[in-house]
Amino acid sequence: MNRRPLQILVVDDDAARAHQLCQALQKAGYHVLRPAVSTQDLVALVDQHEPDVVLLDVESPGRDTLEQIAHITRYRPRAIALFSPDGSPDRIRAAFEAGVSVYSAEGLPPSRVHAAVEIAVAQFERWQCLREELAAAKQSLADRTSLDNAKRFLMEHRQCGEPEAHQLLQKLAMDRRKKLIEAAHDVLAMADILKGKS
């Protein structure tokens, strides 16, 4: 299955190097957006161009750059590859914690452009899958807790067992044409109201 050419945003503080990098990307079949020379407005650039991949080639990613990457990862997640001669372990660790998919302290020669982009995309997709699985697991646990708390409330106030409380929740959900978890939230909201009156 053929995919559309990936949209690449290049941010490089060296104009000559950026030009060479853009040419290599175009030759590899990618669509290169207008390159930027500074990471100062990285969030705004991503919002404006909506790239699939962000390639950053900077001397040293400062705290502001890493904070912007973290913001993008949280609100506009996409593959981010960072190339910098700064190979300190702390800097690399901070970059990955911010959401960088690929970090290299060895630069980005034109011959490795295609591999760098594809690795960044693959890593990003893998981490997105793991994040989604984690979010789903957390939501499932939260829903389970809400259901248990709603049943516990019904058991206490209706003087019934767990099976009867579960049936009451099911009936409430059917009567209101809601999901079971939504009915549980309604019960818990009522429980909060009653607690406030006591």
Image (cartoon, helix red, strand yellow):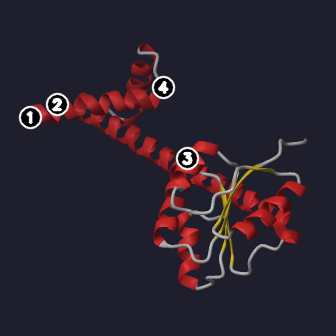
Viewer-side label of 3, 2: 3
Q: Where is residue 93 drawn, in percent x and y?
A: 56, 76
Q: From where the camera sits, is residue 137 visible?
A: no
- Counting other residues with Cα less than 10 Å from the Cα at mark 2, is it few (<14), some (14-19), or many (20 or more)? few
Percent position of residue 51, x then y: 68, 48
Q: Residues within 10 Å of mark 4 (few under 14, many from 20)?
A: some
Which residue corresponds to mark 2? 194
Q: What's under tag 4, amino acid-wise?
A: Lys
| Residue 109 in the figure: left or right of residue 49 | right
Tell me where residue 9 appears, x and y as whole percent.
69, 54
Closer to us: 22 or 2:
22
> At 90% across and 57% down in the image, what residue appears?
27
**SS state under label 4:** loop
Kindly give the residue lying farthest to the front in the view shown.
Answer: 16
The label number, if any, that marks residue 24 in the structure image: none
Residue reaching furthest bottom? 88
Amino acid marked by disc 1 = Ser
Q: Is residue 158 left or right of residue 118?
A: left
The answer to the question of whether label 3 and label 1 lie on touching residues, with beta carbons closer than 8 A, is no
Q: Which residue is mark 1?
A: 198
Q: CA distance from mark 3 to mark 1?
A: 36 Å
Q: Is residue 181 left or right of residue 161?
A: right
In the rendered structure, are the residues bearing label 4 and label 1 in contact, judged by CB atoms less than 8 Å apart? Answer: no
Q: Quadrant of residue 96?
A: bottom right
Q: Quadrant of the N terminus?
A: top right
Residue 110 location, quadrant = bottom right
- Report which residue position mark 3 lands on: 136
CA gap, disc 4 and disc 3: 17 Å
Q: Residue at x 79, y 59 (%)?
A: 22
Which disc number belongs to residue 179? 4
